[in-house]
Amino acid sequence: MHPNRLLSATILAVVAGTALAFPSYESLAGLTGRQLESAIQGLNPKLPPPPPGPLSFSGTKLVDDPAHPWRPLRNGDLRGPCPGLNTLASHGYLPRDGVASPAQFITAVQEGFNMDNPTARVATYLTHLVDGNLVTDLLSIGAKTRRTGPDPPPPAIVGGMNNHGTFEGDASLSRGDAFDGDNHNFNQTLWDQLVDYSNQYGGGFYNLTVAGELRWQRTQQSIATNPEFDFRGLRHFTVVGQASFPAGLFTDGRKTGADKHQLDLVSGLSFFKHMRFPAGFFRASEPTGGVGSDVIFGAHPVLPGRNVGGVNNYVVDTSLGGFGDFCKFYTEFVNITIKGLYPNPTGVLRRNLNLNLGFVYDALAPRLGANCPQVFPYGTN
Ligand code: HEM
Ligand SMILES: *[C@@H]1O[C@H](CO)[C@@H](O)[C@H](O)[C@H]1NC(C)=O
Ligand SMILES: *[C@@H]1O[C@H](CO)[C@@H](O)[C@H](O)[C@H]1NC(C)=O
Ligand SMILES: *[C@@H]1O[C@H](CO)[C@@H](O)[C@H](O)[C@H]1NC(C)=O
């Protein structure tokens, strides 16, 4: 069973027979017709607006500003595996509870980090389709956190972007694999490894050279320890960009010349662990996405694949596309992944699926090439 199906069904089982409503921000993926009907009954349907455009002022500026103070977590705030989004929520660029609409995500990542508009749209709509609530147009960056407790806290219940095998995946730089029990909290052991690599390959800074080596190391570690290691399709494509973000987006936008895109590790820890801008942080100096992804991938090219039947048996599997095979990735994502999550949608759900699928295609189009037509698993009207 797809993990997402189990999740929605479990939430529904908890909700059924109580006065609780299905959470407005959880994915409806995998529910059967009748379960969907019951879940959707209590939800407030929303027509998704078109995606926001690029920033009008797209230079660097102070983003750790008085209007966006960092605040500690409150009980029940949702946080997850993305250090960028966690930081934006803890500074109020995203709602501090960690739940927002796709339009709010795009606005926040542009304003707070100067992520470029196409990258912001691609990441947002891909994630919303697999992890968001398509009826209410809400998406959460993770699951509930606890304000107090042991450090690190025990794994919270899954939900939102914590869902494994959707946008979240294996061999992350600072988070463990779902197989090992915690795929979303900051992991000190893995951070220590990032520090070691930065000392060895970056003169004490995280840069694209470090990213290429650490990306390879984390992949080898998952091959050797995770019998369920899955590095196909979306995951193969996203890990490369995500390894570039600390260099491109967590470095202060005032750095120039040889200092540009060299991330000091005190600042790094501030984002990755504390969900906090370094004091006085300036965002990137121009709209930035996965800058240097080709360098990272090129350092140790690994084809998409997964472990089959146990550890240390990585079998190449390009059936879902991946980095460098974007059209295949797009087509299979829509036709196999999304269709698998929502086999027979009707009503508002179908309408909003079609709108969000259109937003993804528009955002990806520049990378897909001329011979990659839009696919319409639910018709065109
Ligand atoms: C709307 C846009 C975004 C979405 C939907 C998103 C979502 C995610 C998710 C779900 C992950 C977890 C993948 C995994 O490790 O399994 C992730 C990882 C990551 N994201 Fe984001 N993200 C977005 C924007 C950003 C921005 C703006 C930054 C930086 C400023 C960023 C930095 C990172 C980094 C560095 C990782 C890798 C963490 C690691 O491997 O330990 N993301 N993102
Ligand atoms: C952190 O990651 C290491 C290495 O994968 C693992 O052995 C350890 O159990 C993880 N720690 C936690 C608290 O999950
Ligand atoms: C990363 O830092 C190391 C050490 O300073 C340097 O040799 C290397 O060229 C840097 N890589 C990039 C891509 O900046
Ligand atoms: C997508 O799936 C439909 C059936 O649902 C099929 O007719 C179509 O050929 C598929 N498109 C591609 C490009 O694989």
Image (spheres, rainbow, N blue to C red):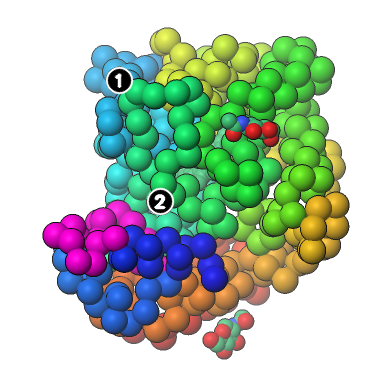
In this rendering, does residue 275 appear at all? Answer: yes
* In this picture, residue 7 sits left or right of residue 2: left
Where 104 falls versus 29 (above or below)?
above
**The disc labelled 1 sits on which kind of residue?**
Arg
Residue at the location (67% across, 68% down)?
320
Q: How many marks?
A: 2
Tell which circle, 1 or 2, labels the residue nearer the N-terminal end. 1
- x and y percent of residue 341 in the render? 47, 72
* In this picture, residue 111 sits left or right of residue 76: right
Nearest to the observer: residue 216 or residue 230: 230
How far apart, in angstroms, are the residues tagged by discs 1 and 2? 22 Å
The label shown at residue 71 is 1
Where 257 falls versus 183 (above or below)?
above
Please rate how many residues cluster around mark 1, counting C-alpha atoms within 10 Å: few if below 14, some from 14 to 19, many from 20.
Answer: few
Q: Quadrant of the C terminus?
A: bottom left
Please rate how many residues cluster around mark 2, counting C-alpha atoms within 10 Å: few if below 14, some from 14 to 19, many from 20.
Answer: many
- Element at badge 2? helix
- Element at badge 1? loop
* In this picture, residue 257 sits left or right of residue 102: right
Task: Report which residue position mark 2 lands on.
Answer: 160
Where 10 falls versus 154 (above or below)?
below
Over which residues does the magenta segment extend? 14-29
User: Quadrant holding ligand 2?
Assistant: top right
